[in-house]
Amino acid sequence: MGLILQKGRFITLEGAEGVGKSTNLNFIAELLESQDVPCVVTREPGGTPLAERIRTILLDKAESDMHAMTELLLMFAARKQHVESLIRPALAAGKWVICDRFTDSTYAYQGYGRELDLATIETLENLCLGSFRPDLTLVLDLPVGRGRDRVAARGEKDRFESESDKFFDKVREGFLQLATRHPRYRVVDASQPLETVQAAIAGIIAELGSGSHG
Ligand code: T5A
């Protein structure tokens, strides 16, 4: 593939539940490691001890009366800690960072899903991150029912997984809307067999490595 190693790149994987983010995150990490590209795999909400503690609160079904704005602020509190103590230092050290969800999930879930004002989210994004954004965002797209089927065998549902199909339809539509906003987004049809999905992802990563990605 011939990746040109210059500086760390920040790749995020996005999509609704069960679209294959974790599966493909590991695939990308193995792909990069096979080419001696140093990389760090992480996730949101979470990624650092403090942010993981916030994640536990956010996913806890016992917090059923959490206000949408509280949820939004906790997402950004966790993100600020994650960016400053893990993501930026890793990129500065020349590592590639591959992250399971990032701010686009906030737009999709808290914005499109919970119907909080997108401009408020943008204000918080600018406040917490300045101009810091991913180099590449892979949006894995899958009909909501298929995502649910893929994770159906798992145990008890968390606070988000307990939401309705209507909520997840809005989330999915949100991701597709976001993907039209900037060339850093690439939508991958996640309903295809895993080998086909991963061949598409490998092609996109190769573009990023060669510098031809928008
Ligand atoms: N959240 C997060 C917000 O509301 N706002 C935010 O700002 C942020 C950052 C976090 C929750 O927090 C919310 C959104 C989330 O609800 P999470 O840990 O990201 O939760 O959990 P999920 O999205 O629920 O993650 P899942 O593990 O359920 O889904 P994945 O990672 O997308 O799916 P994965 O890779 O585990 O795959 C699911 C199954 O499908 C199979 C896999 O083998 C696996 O069994 N699979 C395929 N099968 C057939 N064909 C393919 N192409 C397949 N790809 C994968």
Image (cartoon, rainbow, N blue to C red):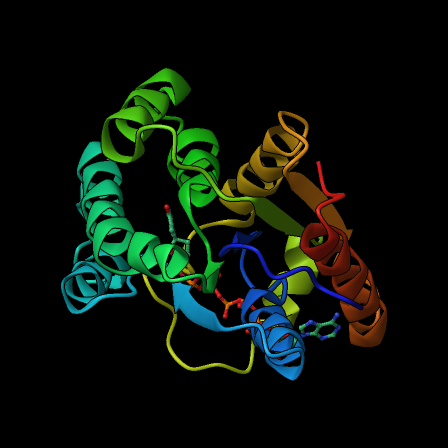
Name the residue nearer the viewer: 213 or 63: 213
Image point (77%, 69%), residue name: 198
- Quadrant of the image containing the C terminus: top right
Residue 129: quarter of image? top left
Quarter of the rendering containing residue 66 = top left
Residue at 46% x, 54% y is 101
Question: In the visual, does 16 lie left or right of 82?
Answer: right
Residue 203 in view here: yes
x and y percentages locating residue 168 in the rendered image: 54, 46
Say if 203 sits above or below 187 in the image. below
- Compared across the picture, whether 167 is left or right of 115 comes to right
- In the depicted structure, whether residue 129 falls above or below residue 80: above
Name the residue located 17 percent from the left edge and 46 percent from the top edge. Answer: 65
**Residue positioned most to the top:** 119
> Where on the picture, by quarter, is residue 1?
bottom right
- 54 or 160, nearer to the observer: 54
Compared across the picture, whether 51 is left or right of 121 comes to left
Q: Nearer the viewer, residue 206 or 60?
A: 206
**Percent position (x, y) of residue 75?**
26, 46
Q: Position of residue 132 (x, y in %)?
A: 39, 36
Whether residue 121 is situated above or below residue 136 in the rendered picture = above
Instruction: Name the residue: 64% across, 48% down.
Output: 139
